[in-house]
Amino acid sequence: MREAVDDFADHLSRVRDRSAHTVRAYVTDVVSLLDHAVRMGCADLAGLDLAVLRSWLARQRTMGAARTTMARRAAAARTFSAWAHRAGLLPHDVAAPLASPRAGRELPTVLRADQAAALMDAPRRAADAHTPAAAGRTTVPAHPSDPTHPGDGEGRSGAQGRSDADRSGADRSDAEDRSDAEDRSDAATADEAGPDDATEAVLLRDRLLLELLYGTGVRVSEACGLDVADVDQARRVVRVLGKGGRERAVPYGVPAQRALDVWLRHGRPRLATAGSGRALLLGARGGRLNPTTARRIVAGWAGAAGVPRVTPHGLRHSAATHLLEGGADLRAVQELLGHSSLASTQIYTHVSVERLRAAYRQAHPRA
C-alpha cells in the first residue's frame, strides 16, 4: 500500500500539477483511509470497497470533522480510487458512488469601507510617529514583530494559492512552527541592522502587504509568492500565479503604487540580503515573507487600527464585496479573484444583498 500512496502522490504532482500543499493534504487523507481499511481487515488495496469508505467518513464525522473537511476527504478518496482503478490496482472505481456532505457556504465577514481605510492607514501612521520629529511627543505603536503581537518572520513561499485541501492541520502546524522560530530572532535581527532602519523598513513592508491584499484581492500565498519582476509599474498591474498554475493579471490602484514605490526605494534595500533573491516582500532577515507570518501581521494591524479582527482572506472578501457594491461586473470580479467557477464569486452578491436588506430594515418605514 505504501508504494501505491507514493505513486499517487507522484501522479498528483506531475500529472495533475497540484501544489505541494494539496498533494500533502490528499496523501494524508489517503493514508488515514488505508489505515482504517487495515483495521477493518483489508489485507491489500484490492480489499477496499464502498463500505470501508463510508465507515471511514463516518468515523471522521464522529471525531468532529467539519463539513468542509469531510467534503475534502471524500474528494481525496474519489480521486485516489479513480487513479487506482486506472492503474490496475482496483478492479473497479469503488468510490465513484461515494457521496460527500455539501460544504456549507457561510457568508464571509467583511470590513466596511471606512474600516478598510483605517486598516490601510495604520502602518503609515505608525511610520509617521516613528520619525525623529515625532519621536519626542508620540508613542509609537508596538509592531507585530513584538513578542506580544503577531510575528514578523520569513520563509520560502510558493506562488500558488491554497486550495481547500491546503488547510490541513499538518500543513499549518509546520508553517507556524517555522514562523515561531523565526519570530524569536527578529528582535535581535532588528538590533543588528539598526532599530530605526529595520523598524521603518518593516512598517513600509507591512503597508505594501495590506495595500496588495485589499487593493488587488489576491490570496495571501499569491502575495507572498510575488517577485519584483511580477509588478508592472507602468501599467499598474501585478502578474499572479494562482491555483492550478493559472496566471492572471490584476490591476492595483494609486495607494498601492505609492506604497510600492516607497518600499522599493527605502524599505526593501534595508532588509535585502544575498539570499533575498527576487522576492518582493521580505521578512526581517531578508528571506521571502512567510504566508503564516503575513496572517499574523494583518491581525496585528487590525488590532492596532481598532477594526474587527480580519485575516488576509477577509481582506480578499472585503475587496470583492466593495467592488460589487461599487457596480463592478460579476465576471470581472471573478477574473480578478482568479475563481475558476462563477459560483465561487456569487457568494459576494449574497453579502451585498444582506447589507442592503439590513439597511432597508433599519431605514424604511414599512420594513
Image: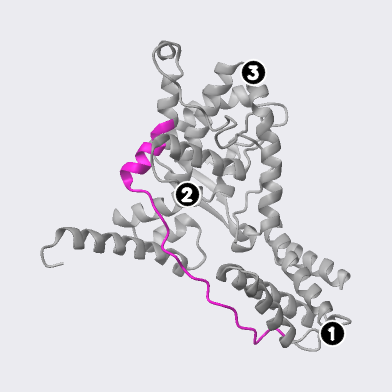
Q: Amino acid at mark 1?
A: Ala
Please give the range of residues in magenta: 93-122
Q: Position of residue 69 (x, y in %)?
A: 61, 68
Point out the image quarter for the C terminus. bottom left
Cα separation between marks 2 and 1: 48 Å
**Outermost residue, left direction?**
365
Task: Please give the name of the residue rendered at 47% of the width and 56% of the height, measured from the top-left corner.
Answer: 337
Q: CA distance from mark 3 to mark 1?
A: 61 Å
Q: Magenta segment: does it hold 103?
A: yes
Tell whether label 1 touches label 3 (CB within 8 Å): no
Q: Is residue 355 left or right of residue 9?
A: left
For marks 2 and 3, the one nearer the N-term is: 3
Do the residues under discs 2 and 1 have CB atoms within 8 angstroms? no
Q: Which residue is mark 2?
A: 250
Mark 3 neighbour density, 10 Å: few (under 14) some (14–19) many (20 or more): few
Under mark 2, the amino acid is Val
- Residue located beneath label 3 in the image: 191
Which residue is found at the position 74% from the left and 83% from the top? 52
Say what secondary structure mark 3 lies in: helix
Q: Relative to 175, is 162 above or below?
A: below
Relative to 70, does residue 154 appear above or below in the rendering?
A: above
Q: Position of residue 366 (x, y in %)?
A: 11, 67
Residue labelled with disc 1:
46
Residue at 20%, 63% in the rendered image:
361
Question: Which of the two discs, 3 and 1, labels the residue nearer the N terminus?
Answer: 1
- For disc 2, the neighbor class at 10 Å (few under 14, some 14 to 19, many from 20) is some
